[in-house]
């Protein structure tokens, strides 16, 4: 709790904000369902990296007001609403070819680096030597990888040839339970999501992450194709200011990100 108070104090101590613009409509956004490491949980005090980052942006530039963070939407719906222009932007998506066909991204600065890792059963010591996809392929039928349908991590995984991927589940927790029942050898997801799931379900004695990092990609802000260029530029300027004054780095360190 003291760490969070220190973080809040650091945010409140931000230097003078960007020059005030004329009042504008709030930016329409949303929280991501099932991603407490980014947005916390519905009905609980706001937490998670993205929530803290949004708060820091508003402190840096009071004209950046965000609405819709009380609605928690699944990723596929977030993508649809971004493409349709019913959301202006969303904090925290990986860039993929399919997504680039539907909406845009602010590529600099990134929010943080998302590492692709795998969870395994704690007692499965035979997989300790796994360092890359080739090691998983070598396991043959004993190397089934569980993945959550519709996510960018799964899309990346499916582009790797020769893997045995089970993406039948649409929920991360369902995959974790499949892993525990032996219905797969690995669960492939982001480092932050795996860590959060293990902690939330109190599975530290049953599930662990292998040290191997299979990919590392920047998590970005996605913006609707209908959003005005001037507004995107203003948001980007505020994000760059958080990088310059060290606020973004402090947020990443607080949340165990880089």
Image: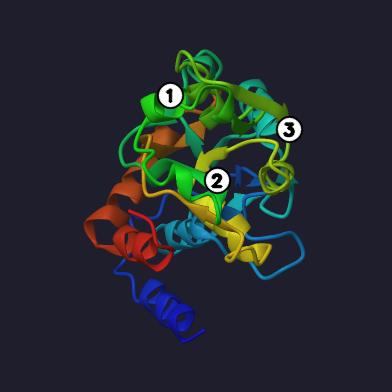
**Residue holding disc 1:** 138
Q: Is residue 113 left or right of residue 70?
A: left
Disc 2 versus disc 1: distance between alpha carbons?
56 Å
Considering depth in this image, is 145 or 154 the residue closer to the camera? Answer: 145
Question: Where is residue 137, by image quadrant?
Answer: top left
**Residue holding disc 3:** 169
Residue placed furthest toward the right: 43
Considering depth in this image, is 36 or 58 the residue closer to the camera? Answer: 36
* Element type where label 3 sits in the image: strand
In the image, residue 95 sits, relative to residue 255, either above or below, namely: above
Q: Is residue 243 left or right of residue 236?
A: left
Depth check, mark 3 against mark 1: the one in front is 1
Between disc 3 and disc 1, whose residue precedes?
Answer: 1
**Can residue 64 be seen in this snapshot?**
no
Q: Which mark is residue 24?
A: 2
Disc 3 versus disc 1: distance between alpha carbons?
24 Å
Residue 13 point in image, percent of width and height: 34, 76
- Dot 2: within a 10 Å radius of its alpha carbon, few (fewer than 14), some, or many (20 or more) residues? few
Disc 3 versus disc 2: distance between alpha carbons?
41 Å
Between disc 2 and disc 1, whose residue precedes?
Answer: 2
Instruction: Identify which residue is drawn at 45% across, 29% down.
Output: 136
């Amino acid at each position: 709790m003291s760490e969070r108070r220190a973080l809040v104090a650091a945010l409140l101590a931000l230097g003078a904000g960007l020059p005030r613009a004329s009042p504008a409509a709030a930016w329409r956004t949303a929280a991501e369902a099932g991603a407490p490491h980014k947005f916390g949980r519905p009905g609980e005090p706001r937490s998670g990296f993205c929530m803290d980052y949004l708060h820091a942006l508003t402190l840096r530039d009071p004209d950046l007001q965000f609405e819709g963070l009380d609605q928690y939407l699944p990723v596929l719906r977030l993508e649809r609403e971004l493409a349709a222009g019913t959301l202006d932007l969303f904090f925290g998506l990986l860039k993929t070819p399919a997504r680039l066909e539907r909406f845009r991204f602010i590529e600099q600065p990134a929010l943080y680096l998302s590492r692709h890792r795998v969870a395994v059963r704690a007692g499965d010591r035979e997989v300790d030597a796994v360092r890359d996809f080739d090691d998983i392929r070598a396991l043959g039928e004993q190397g089934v990888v569980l993945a959550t349908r519709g996510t960018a991590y799964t899309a990346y995984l499916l582009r790797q040839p020769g893997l045995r991927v089970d993406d039948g589940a649409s929920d991360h927790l369902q995959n974790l339970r499949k892993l525990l029942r032996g219905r797969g050898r690995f669960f492939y997801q982001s480092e932050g999501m795996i860590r959060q799931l293990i902690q939330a379900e109190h599975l530290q004695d049953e599930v662990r992450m292998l040290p191997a990092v299979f990919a590392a990609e920047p998590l970005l802000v996605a913006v609707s194709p209908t959003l005005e260029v001037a507004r995107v530029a203003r948001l980007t300027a505020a994000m760059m200011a958080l990088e310059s004054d060290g606020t973004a780095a402090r947020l990443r360190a607080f949340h165990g990100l880089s």
